[in-house]
Amino acid sequence: MDTISDRLNQIMMAMNAGKKNFEMYSSKFLVKVLEIMKKNGYIDYKLKDDKFQKVVIEIKLLNECRSIRPRFYVKKDELDRYIRRFLPSRGFGVIIISTSKGLMTHNEALEKGIGGSLIAYCF
């Protein structure tokens, strides 16, 4: 079972239902993905202090966020092909990549000249 896919689908279902604020269960990996989305202005989130590790999400400027399955491993030279495949245009949206240096956007990976595993995209 893919928890990142499930959580990103929850965000999309809440957005399609017209909700701006909602809560869901979190994990350390999900919080890192949400941090990248927050840094790019798509959402805002707060962690709740309880034993169930819930996170409260506020949707801001999000059109779509999806998980990339299967997880493609991409070299730095092949990244442009996946940018054209998953994003609607060049400078619009981000692809989240898991690299040896941690989670980062495709722009940061291109600057550092490293590849990695594609996790999700949002715009």
Image (tube, rainbow, N blue to C red):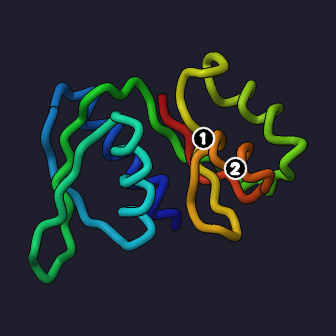
In the displayed image of the protein, which residue is found farthest to the top?
A: 89
Mark 2: which amino acid?
Ala
In this view, the residue in front, 61 or 54, is: 61
Residue 15 rendering spot, x and y as whole percentages: 27, 31
Q: How many residues crowd mark 1 within 10 Å: few (<14), some (14–19), many (20+)? A: many
Q: Residue 77 in the image: state x and y as whole percent.
A: 90, 43
Q: Which element type, helix, strand or loop, lies under badge 1?
A: strand
**Residue 50 vertical position relative to residue 93 in the rendered view, above or below:** below
Q: Residue at x 37, y 53 (%)?
A: 34
Instruction: Tell whether 76 sits left or right of 29.
Output: right
Q: Which amino acid is tagged 1?
A: Ile
Residue 47 - label: none
Q: Nearer the viewer, mark 1 or mark 2?
A: 2
Q: Residue furthest front?
A: 111
Find numbered disc 2 in the image and state the secondary structure of the residue it sits on: helix
Q: Which mark is residue 109?
A: 2
Kindly identify the residue that appears in the image at 38 percent across and 44 percent down.
39
Residue topped by disc 1: 95
The correct choice, above or below, for 51 with respect to 104 in the image is below
**Left or right of residue 108, residue 93 in this image:** left
Q: Quadrant of residue 83?
A: top right
Q: Nearer the viewer, residue 26 or 69?
A: 26
N-terminal of the pair, mark 1 or mark 2, is 1
Residue 56 location in percent, x, y? 16, 54
